[in-house]
Structures are given as C-alpha cells and as structure tokens.
Image: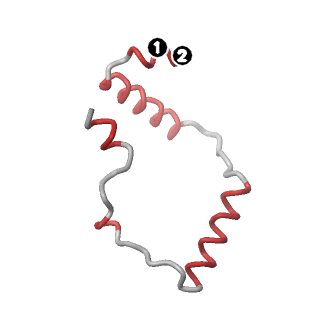
Amino acid sequence: MLESAQISKMSMAERLQAMEQLWDALCRGGGEVSSPEWHEEVLARRKARANRGGVNPARWASADGVTGAERLFSK
C-alpha cells in the first residue's frame, strides 16, 4: 500500500495513473459497498423539497467546470 509521503513525491502524471488503476480495480472488484444511512435521509429531504417546488435545477451544460479538477491543473 502507498503511504501519503510516497504519494506526495509522485508527479501529477503518476498520481493520475495511480487513480486510474484504483478506479479500474474498483470497477472489477466484486463486493458492493452500501451507502451510509444518512445518504438516504439527505436524498429523501432533497426529493421532498423538489416535489414542493423548492429548487431551481440548473442544466448540466451550464455547470461551471469540474470543481476540484480545475484547481488541480491550474497550479
């Protein structure tokens, strides 16, 4: 297993490659991971609010970039 110190020493390309390998392994891996109970509660509240008309959803095309990724690559 990689330690945090080892990851810190990796180049951005190496980190991205490691992430790709992790995602591939997760996709192939068998076991299901169940969501925590609070996820269901949050989704229920959001659905209820949407049903009451309490949200104004934006279209995906108008989203302002990918949060996080832009910060990673703008350094």
> In this figure, which residue is indicated by the disc labeled 2?
3
Q: Position of residue 59 (x, y in %)?
A: 35, 72
> In this figure, which residue is indicated by the disc labeled 1?
6
Q: Quadrant of residue 60?
A: bottom left
Q: Position of residue 15 (x, y in %)?
A: 38, 25
Query: Extreme right residue here?
Result: 37
Residue 16: mark: none
Q: Is residue 6 above or below residue 42?
A: above
Considering the numbered disc 2 on the image, is that residue within a helix, a strand or a loop?
loop
Inter-mark Cα distance, 2 to 1: 5 Å
Q: Residue at 47%, 31% (x, y): give it.
A: 22
Q: Residue at 30%, 43% (x, y): give it.
A: 70
Query: Extreme front residue here?
Result: 75
Considering the numbered disc 1 on the image, is that residue within a helix, a strand or a loop?
helix
Left or right: residue 52 versus residue 10 is right
Q: Is residue 30 above or below residue 3?
A: below
Please rate how many residues cluster around mark 2, counting C-alpha atoms within 10 Å: few if below 14, some from 14 to 19, many from 20. Answer: few
Q: Is residue 63 above or below residue 34?
A: below
